[in-house]
Image (cartoon, helix red, strand yellow):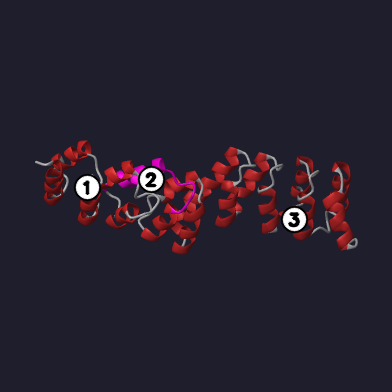
Amino acid sequence: MSDLPELHQRLREAGEEELLALLREHATELAPPDLRHALRNPYCTAEAIERIAGEQRLLSFYEVRRDLTLHPRTPETLAARFVPTLYWRDLMVLSLDSRLRPALRRAAETQLAARLPGMAMGEKISLARRASPGVIAQLRHDPSPGVIAALLDNPRLTEGALGPVVHAVRTPPAILELIAGDRRWGVRYPLRLALARNPATPLQTAWRLLETLRKADLRPVAADPRLAEPLRRRARVLLGE
């Protein structure tokens, strides 16, 4: 192969036509680290990327498939071929990259959702901290408080996404308690109200939440036969009845 530092510089700085010529000339010699210089070139076009993808030898390297999938100029049909072969961390990066086409990001989310049942707890916790909205919609139903605690710190989590969790009777009590005590989400009035009215919320937590509710919202609590009698009685006391 040509002098590597010189070739790397040429791959980084070549114009569109020269880059294509370099890829043709050195196709049988290039290794994944060499290709990164070409992919960082601002003149790396879809044609250049297809030239790289035409080398079956290069596609046997994981990092080449990953770098091609994450390149904004890779044709969508080509990138979609590689999505199922990516590790979960790279799928997460792909799902969050706004430079890429929405269909490609959704494909990454679909892959992540399919892999969730087989992921280790630590992996799910790491994913929950950064997950995209499509993956949050799956992770929010995880029964592990550790996963939900990480999800509560995710800047992409919204009140709307958390709503179904606090309303669902099947949500584990420990998770409802976790949300109620969260510094960011426990102060949201609609969530506090939903938690207070959820029969699965631990009694002590729901009791504390009653003190923060408006009188108009205490009346449905007092009348709800699904709720524990001490809670309904406390709501009546707060109403002055």
Magenta region includes residue 165: yes
User: Mark 2 sits on what residue?
Assistant: 162
In this rendering, position of residue 186 left or right of residue 229: right
User: Mark 3 sits on what residue?
Assistant: 58
Above or below for 149 versus 107: below
Magenta-drawn segment: 153-169
Q: Nearer the viewer, mark 2 or mark 3?
A: 2
* Label pair 1/3, CB-CB below 8 angstroms: no
In this rendering, position of residue 61 left or right of residue 236: right
Along the polypeptide, which appears first: circle 1 or circle 3?
3
Magenta region includes residue 138: no
Crowd class of label 1 (few under 14; some 14 to 19; many from 20; radius 10 Å): many
Q: Quadrant of the C terminus?
A: top left
Badge 2 element:
helix
Separation of disc 1 and disc 3 at Cα?
63 Å
Crowd class of label 3 (few under 14; some 14 to 19; many from 20; radius 10 Å): many
**Viewer-proximal residue among 239 and 120:** 239
Residue 210's label in the rendered image is 1
Looking at the picture, which amino acid does disc 1 mark?
Leu
Q: Residue furthest left?
A: 241
Along the polypeptide, which appears first: circle 2 or circle 3?
3
In this rendering, position of residue 204 left or right of residue 63: left
Separation of disc 2 and disc 3 at Cα?
43 Å
In this rendering, position of residue 24 left or right of residue 240: right
Residue at image coords 35%, 56%: 143
Crowd class of label 2 (few under 14; some 14 to 19; many from 20; radius 10 Å): some
Residue at image coords 70%, 58%: 61
- Residue 137, quarter of picture: top left
**Viewer-proximal residue among 7 and 78:** 7
